[in-house]
Image: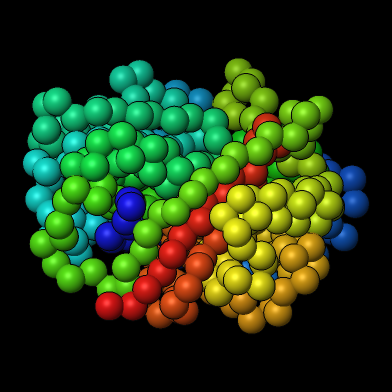
Amino acid sequence: MPEIISVSRTDMPYKFAQSEMKKFAEGIFNGKVPDAERLMSVFENSEIDERNLCVPLEYFKESKSFAERNNDYLKFTVEFSVKAIKECLLKSGFSSDEITDIIFISSTGISTPSPDAFIINELKLNKNINRYPLWGLGCAGGVAGIAKAKVITESNPNALVVLVTSELCSLTFLNDDYSKSNLVATSLFSDGVAAVLIKGDGLNSPKGIDPKIEIKDAMSRIYYDSIDVMGWEVTDAGLKVIFSRDIPLIVEDKLRPDIEIFLKRNDLKTDDIKNYVTHPGGIKVIEAYIKSLDIDPSFLIIQKSVLRKYGNMSSATVIYVLEQFISSGFKDGFGLMTSLGPGFSSEMVLLNIQSN
């Protein structure tokens, strides 16, 4: 059975208190957005303490073209992805030339060739490596990447797959977009890069990995007629955020039935899940998970901690949560990875975790 053998996450060079981010936003939105002063309460209500950014706040006060910001996206993506992959390899004992497949996930910049080509050149990975660049999955991308790695390693038991997710959400910020969606996004999103190493069951790990994390099953779900819930509008200036206030309601309404279907096909119920490795889209989304699944809030303590320390880093966030679970929070038994994203869609992965 495929196994997750190492996970790494990146701390960005700049960290700002949420109070600093609010002050910055006030300078942008006050007087431009109707009822902006009242809406600024979203910064406190988010329960985020700090935000992870790849550039200083002064960067966003300047007028920069889409091309300039996208060039920075590519530069930082390659730099931090290489760092995350090296850390993953160091933890695992595998070498870079043993990687057979690379899955690259992102929604916050564009590049042809895709960023994985630059990463491969930087690390001098195998010239015959299989490449899977995936764009546009948004917050769902981290769990979707794990699911894709499962398919690869099942078709080739000797595969060693590296999944890297790079989301530099801050570089999409448009300082002349005075929509409520942009104000809310400014209170929530930040930057993150993370990597996961997954092996097929034909490979032996050079190091004893603890805990043992098997990928048992995966399921995707797209909800019809909900395209406009979340995503980007591509404009001349860049990527303009689309962000519906209905997202927590959709989570609360749709999530439990889908999870029950997914678990039932594995002869499981929600009571059998010991670890919820969910994407913390925001505090309201976390609360919607608790209400929908009728679980003790203690199950999502790590999610709240990651959200508090980093903010929402789109697809990378759930990998930060996974890394935190591995280092300090796993219980032996089944784990459920879930995330939701544009489409509107959900991704689920079932894990089996056992301490060695």
Which quarter of the picture shows residue 344?
top right
Residue 16 rendering spot, x and y as whole percentages: 51, 65
* Horizontal side, residue 301 vs residue 289: left or right: left
* 167 vs 348, nearest the viewer: 348
Name the image quarter holding the C terminus: bottom left
Q: Is residue 104 above or below residue 112?
A: below
* Position in image of residue 256 (x %, y %): 75, 56
Q: Is residue 348 left or right of residue 185?
A: left
Instruction: Classify residue 45 by image quadrant.
Output: bottom right
Asked whether 297 or 313 is in front, the reply is 297
**For the point 60% across and 59% down, which residue is it?**
267
| Number of numbered discs visible in the structure rendering | 0
Q: How is the image coloured?
A: rainbow
Q: Is residue 215 left or right of residue 62?
A: left
Q: Residue furthest front?
A: 267
Q: Closer to the camera, 247 or 348?
A: 348
Provide residue 164's location: percent of width, then percent of height. 35, 45
**Could you tell me if residue 213 is visible in this image?**
yes
Residue sitting at 41 percent across and 69 percent down? 353
Residue 29, placed above or below residue 122 = below
Could you tell me which residue is drawn at 55 percent across and 74 percent down?
A: 274
Q: Residue furthest right?
A: 35
Q: Residue 97, percent across and down?
A: 9, 41
| Residue 27 seen | no
Give above or below for 53 relative to 114.
Answer: below
